[in-house]
Amino acid sequence: MRIYHEPVAVLFRDAPAQFIWRGRLLLVKEVQALTREASPWWRSTETKGEDLLREREVWRVEAGNGRLGRGVYELARTVGGDDWVLQAVAD
């Protein structure tokens, strides 16, 4: 897995349906997994007490756009939020 942690725009309907990363539209073909994890409080210099309790959803999806084939991507956000990031891409 290559780690990126780059912001992405995600169309979400019960699960990620598509996302834009580096100017490319990728369509989600399959959701492989959904996990929840504690927020990485150690990355923020402005962490407030309530932020320490926030969970993040990590969606592992298979996605592609037809031209470049498919890949496995990890999309993450704060539960209930819209702060999506591309967390990682499988090699």
Image (spheres, grey):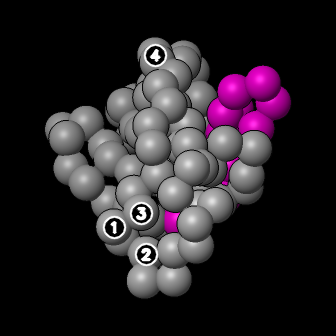
Which stretch is magenta?
A: 7-20
* Label 2 to label 3: alpha-carbon separation: 6 Å
Please identify, in this view, whether the residue under mark 4 or under mark 1 is nearer the observer.
1
Identify the residue at image location x=36%, y=32%. Answer: 71
Q: Residues within 10 Å of mark 2 (few under 14, many from 20)?
A: few
Any part of residue 84 in sight: yes
Q: Secondary structure at mark 2?
A: loop
Q: Quick check: 9 above or below 89?
A: below
| Amino acid bearing label 4 | Gln
Q: Which mark is residue 44?
A: 2
Is there a contact, CB below 8 Å, between mark 2 and mark 3?
yes
Q: Within 10 Å of the Cα at label 1, are there few (<14), some (14-19), or many (20+) other Cα atoms?
A: few
| Element class at badge 4 | strand
Is residue 43 placed above or below 2 in the rendered structure? below
Mark 3 sits on what residue? 41
73 with respect to 19 (left or right): left
Indicate which disc, 4 or 1, sits on the residue closer to the N terminus.
Answer: 4
The residue mark sitting in front, 4 or 2, is 2
Residue 10 falls left or right of residue 57: right
Which residue, as the protein is rendered here, is positioned at the far right? Answer: 13
- Residue 32: which numbered mark, if any? 4
In the rendered image, residue 2, in percent from the top left (x then y), is placed at 21, 50
